[in-house]
Image: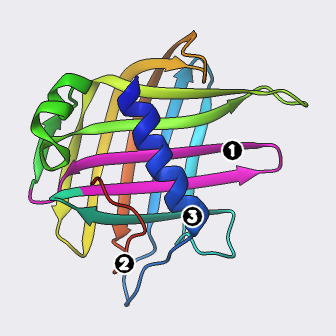
Amino acid sequence: MRRAASTLACAVALAVSGCDSTGPSPTPYLSFTYSGVASGTFSVQGALTEQSTSGVTGGTDQGASVVMAVMADGATGILAFVLFPTASTGTLALQTEAQCDEGGPSMCVGVALMLTLGTGAEPTIALCTLTSGSVTVTKSTTEEAAGTFSGTGTCVDFADTDLGTITLTDGAFLVRHSADPPFTFG
């Protein structure tokens, strides 16, 4: 679960700092359907900027591509990301934390999300990491990435308490990487 927490921390730093894509390109998006510990549809279009509460951004570092999307709606929200080697296309199996630790960011394939469960003064934040499934990368360059993903995983809270399983289906993304991503894996 360290991988999910550290990668989510990286993604949160990216969301808080706010960045945008440069140059003309199709509208970025990240979407999927989820069920299990929570159920619903996640769909975000448009670039994440300093002024937006929702959007999609991406970047590359040490041979890895990260696609991240934030959707905030009042007291609830979802932060989702997809990680894969920048130079890869095709169907890539999701990897375990040990495999990602061994191979480093440029060899890691993962999908994780952070979502709000419940409402009120003390909602539970679920940190979810897919442990089986795949990412199919149809385009991957230092400038853009596109593909699909699906899988099943587990969710925990910040105290590492098991909250149950989650399944993601019909995942899809298109992003133009930020020219200066505000995150690194170093």
- Can the viewer see residue 96? no
Residue at 79% x, 27% y is 123
Quadrant containing the N terminus is top left
x then y, percent, for residue 127? 53, 28
Above/below status of 50 relative to 30 = below
Q: Does label 3 or label 1 sit earlier along the sequence? A: 3
Dot 1 crowding, Cα within 10 Å, few <14, some 14–19, many 20+: some
Q: In this view, does 14 lie to the left or right of 96?
A: right
Q: Mark 1 points at which residue?
A: 77
Residue 33 higher or lower than 47, as above or below: above
Q: How far apart are marks 3 and 1 (CA)?
A: 12 Å
Q: Give the range drawn in magenta.
A: 65-87
Towards the viewer: 102 or 67: 102
Figure quadrant of residue 23: bottom left
Q: In this view, does 125 lie to the left or right of 68?
A: right
Tell me the quarter of the picture where residue 108 sits: top left
Q: In this view, does 179 lie to the left or right of 61?
A: right
Q: What residue type is labelled 2?
A: Asp
Circle 2 residue: 180
Q: Furthest-bottom residue in view?
A: 23
Task: Please determine whether, in this image, residue 122 is positioned above or below residue 92.
Answer: above
Helix, strand or loop for disc 2: loop
| Three-letter amino acid code at the position of disc 3 | Gly
User: How much space separates mark 2 and mark 1, taking CA atoms?
Assistant: 25 Å
